Image (cartoon, coloured by chain):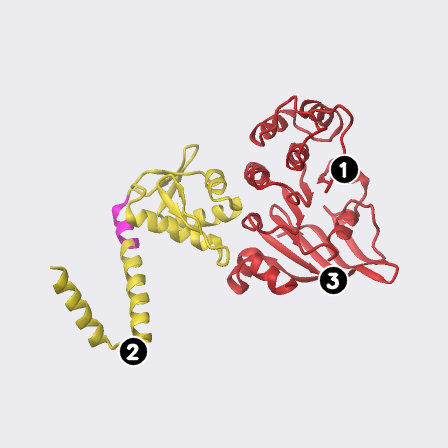
């Protein structure tokens, strides 16, 4: 998987998974990480499809979903822009953090650690980092 | 979702061999559909049926609601799997030829395409590489504003750079205009991200077909599926 940069955003697409979900998730995570700023214009469907070498319908579907979540807004004749609402961005950051924690807990559980074990490991790490 | 092409129970025999054996296909409008499969699976027989060159022994086939025939030339832009040029033809004279003779041919679009595909006006067809020939044929094919594009093996036997340029030109053309695109190919590497819909042909039948995103979530990449079907 090659990393492709498009207008500050980073993409790495895996052809064995639905591409639309990956484009959507990766734009969301670029917004959460601040790789693309609030109110900034995002590439057009055509530009994004060209850069990622994927079907424009796939990009369109991801863009429609972003718009439905109100993370982007389309201004007639000007293009599509990231929301200027910081609350919406903070909302995705929290959602992504929650997903990361769920994934982490799942892995720890599969290794046989209990919630108490995990807490003490995290505490020890935290103390070490101070 | 309306079908631009619909084939039901298509069968074609050559002697004892069935090139197509009860083949079903639906090509949705305004999408890029790929017919995939190795040589000899029945893809070319189907492509010849689409242009009306071969009639099925049984089954029915409609293209844009009609039975396929040469009359559909005004509605369908067909990219053949091999090139034929006149003596002394150049990129420029090929585009002039297209302007005079091909229905709905847009000269400006053709020059834009030739430019983005890296073809100089005075380049002669004699002495072109396979990749350059493929790019010129694609220029003539994509410059037509018709509802249906049918591309027969647009990627085979050409260099990586030509292939990438062709993929980008297709994305661009598809993003700009609402056309239905059918691509018949056995080259999946570097091209599968283009497809909305795929039909895998095996022994003259449709072994598997569906939306590419749904196929990905169920069975992985088109390359994975290709390997498991034909490997």
Where is mark 2, residue-wise? A112
Q: Quadrant of the C terminus of chain B?
A: bottom right
Residue neighbourhood size for the residue with mark 3, other residues' Cα within 10 Å, grouped as few (<14), some (14–19), many (≥20): some
**Residue placed furthest toward the right:** B15
Specify the chain shown as red: B
Q: Secondary structure at mark 2?
A: loop
Front one among A117 and B212: A117
Which range of residues does the magenta coloring cover? A85-92
Magenta segment, prevailing SS (helix, strand or loop): helix
Q: Earlier in the sequence, mark 1 or mark 3?
A: 1
Residue at mark 1: B73
Tell me, by letter, which chain the rendering colours yellow.
Answer: A
C-alpha distance separating marks 2 and 1? 67 Å
> Is residue B4 rendered to the left or right of residue A51?
right
Residue A109 lies, in percent from the top left, at: 30, 75
Q: Residue at x 30, y 66 (%)?
A: A104
- The residue indicated by pointer 3 is B203
Q: Nearer the viewer, residue A83 or B175?
A: B175
């Amino acid at each position: 998987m090659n990393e492709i940069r498009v207008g500050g955003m980073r993409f790495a697409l895996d052809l064995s998974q639905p591409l639309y979900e990956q484009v959507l998730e990766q734009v969301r995570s670029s917004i959460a990480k601040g790789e693309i700023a609030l109110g900034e214009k995002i590439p057009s469907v055509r530009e994004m499809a060209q850069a990622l070498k994927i079907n424009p319908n796939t990009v369109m579907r991801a863009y429609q979903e972003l718009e439905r979540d109100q993370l982007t807004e389309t201004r007639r004749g000007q293009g599509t822009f990231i929301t200027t609402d910081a609350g919406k961005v903070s909302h995705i950051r929290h959602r992504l953090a929650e997903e990361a924690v769920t994934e982490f807990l799942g892995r720890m559980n599969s290794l046989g650690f209990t919630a108490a074990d995990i807490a003490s490991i995290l505490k020890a790490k935290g103390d070490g980092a101070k | 979702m309306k079908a631009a092409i619909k084939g039901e129970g298509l069968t074609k025999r050559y002697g004892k061999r069935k090139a197509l054996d009860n083949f079903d296909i639906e090509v949705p409008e305004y999408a890029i559909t790929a017919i995939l499969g190795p040589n000899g699976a029945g893809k070319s027989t189907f492509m010849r049926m689409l242009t009306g060159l071969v009639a099925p022994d049984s089954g029915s086939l409609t293209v844009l609601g009609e039975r396929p025939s040469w009359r559909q030339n005004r509605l369908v832009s067909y990219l053949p799997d091999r090139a034929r040029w006149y003596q002394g033809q150049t990129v420029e004279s090929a585009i002039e030829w297209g302007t005079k003779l091909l229905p709905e041919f847009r000269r400006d679009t053709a020059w834009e395409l030739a430019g983005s595909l890296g073809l100089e006006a005075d380049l002669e067809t004699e002495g072109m590489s396979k990749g350059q020939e493929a790019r010129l044929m694609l220029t003539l094919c994509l410059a037509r504003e018709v509802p249906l594009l049918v591309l027969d093996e647009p990627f085979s036997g050409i260099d990586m750079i030509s292939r990438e340029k062709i993929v980008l030109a297709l994305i661009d053309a598809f993003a700009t205009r609402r056309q239905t695109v059918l691509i018949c190919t056995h080259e999946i590497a570097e091209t599968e991200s283009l497809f909305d819909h795929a039909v895998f042909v095996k022994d003259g039948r449709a072994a598997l077909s569906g939306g590419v995103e749904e196929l990905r979530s169920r069975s992985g990449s088109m390359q994975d599926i290709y390997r498991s079907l034909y490997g």
